[in-house]
Amino acid sequence: MASEVVEIEGHIIDSLILAKVMDLILAAGADYRVLEVEIGKTNVDMSRARLEVSTPDADALQSLLDELQVHGANRVVTADAELVAADTDGVLPVGFYSTTNLPTSVRIGGRWVEVRQPEMDCGLVYEGLIYDGEGRLTSVPMHRIRIGDLVVVGTEGVKVSPPSRPRGAHPFEFMNSDVSSEKPKALLVRRVAERIRRAKASGAKVLAVCGPAVIHTGAGPSVAALVREGWVDVLFAGNGFATHDLESNVMGTSLGVSVHEGTAAEGGHSNHLRVINEIRRYGSIGAAVDAGYIDGGVMYECVRRGVPFVLGGSVRDDGPLPDVYTDVVEAADAMRYLVPGVGVALMLASTLHAIATGNLLPAGVETFCVDINPAVATKLADRGSHQALGIVTDVGLFTSGLVEQLITPT
């Protein structure tokens, strides 16, 4: 038998992290022995547990330890992490440590160095002198690796803090599940508005990730109002969202359907193409706004207020609009550049862009996934965004409720 002692610390009881770790050990055909448990007396006290994990062989143990670390169960470490220099641009060394979006520290030169801006599915690159542990440790995506970069290899000397629910009152503490269609929507909207106010008061940014359904459902004016009044600081979307936002402003339709009457306009199927064509004639959305061709909508408010936006393209895009990143790697890098400082993320009727954004966000960013389909929020959480909380409702009703809470005088 091969064995290793792991330690997990934090709010591991009420968040059920300890139970999850134990279940994972047994599900892998391994065994555990509880060596030590210290349980906090109040809901603000930390708890700690040490387990001896045993498996039939060393390979199975290593695989299980990698899985447990995603949930914050770390080896009891006394050694420094191994650093290996990359020998090829865009290629990580064999056995590189694959990151999560949880708070992570690495032991280097006898000191624990915290990872800046944790991001999942990356490598860890250390910049500085190895012997003093006073350098900088960052999550670096594979395509950004350069020859000579010192990359953390293996899990030895790496410590991950377990995910935990927000302390105190939070939007979902009165119901156990994170995704449900039965939660009182007015209360949820009010509490999300409170989280947004709190984030803005602390100097954090609010990110909105929007899908085309935001426009189709009539939520565009509400999102535009949130941008105009300073409640949205960054916008991520695709060609579809921006196109239909612009189409609704110029033509009064969204995908050829009247946004006021809900009926199909004659020849409306080509409306979005005509708008894209004119925007391309101007050269950019900003130029079209300056020229007066666009005089309202979400993209208009972003331009007028100076709110940065990233439009990431896909193979199905019409046009696309001149502002769209057609290279997905460039789009992800542009999004990555704007993520630091975000405290709250609103995923509004978006699946692919929500998942892509979730991959970039540290676990500490409060993330609210709003969609009529509960599977969207579930997919986001399943892909590692442990902090994502789902609100199953029509995005139009949700955004209009946010406007009432944040903008409309009471």
Image (cartoon, grey):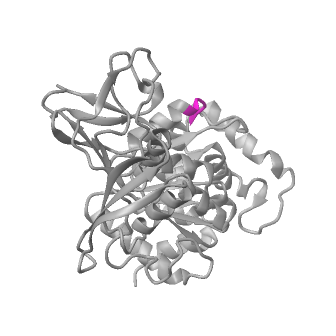
Q: Quadrant where the C terminus lies?
A: bottom left
| Residue at screen point 23% across, 37% down | 79
- The magenta segment is 324-328
Residue lying farthest left?
A: 132
Q: Measuring 58% from the left and 48% from the top, which residue is drawn there?
A: 353
Between 369 and 133, the one lying in front of the other is 133
Q: Is residue 297 visible?
A: no
Residue nearest the viewer, comparing 109 with 23? 23
Would you place residue 285 above or below residue 296 in this image?
above
Say whether residue 70 is left or right of residue 383: left
Residue 265 rendering spot, x and y as whole percentages: 83, 57
Quarter of the rendering containing residue 12: bottom left
Instruction: Please state which of residues 322 and 378 is positioned toward the viewer in this rendering.
Output: 378
Residue at point 44%, 29% (across, down)? 95
- What's the residue at 39%, 38% (across, down)? 337
Tally of marks = 0
110 sits left or right of 31 in the view = left
Q: Residue 231 location, x and y as percent?
A: 40, 62
Image coordinates for residue 399, horizontal then vertical, percent: 54, 69
Left/right placement of residue 306 relative to residue 290 reads: left
Would you place residue 89 above or below residue 324 in this image?
above
Q: Position of residue 197 (x, y in %)?
A: 34, 69
Does residue 2 appear in this view? yes
Residue 283 falls inside the magenta stretch: no
Q: In the figure, 144 relative to 287: above or below?
A: above
Q: Quadrant of residue 34?
A: bottom left
Q: Which residue is situated farthest in the front direction here? A: 1
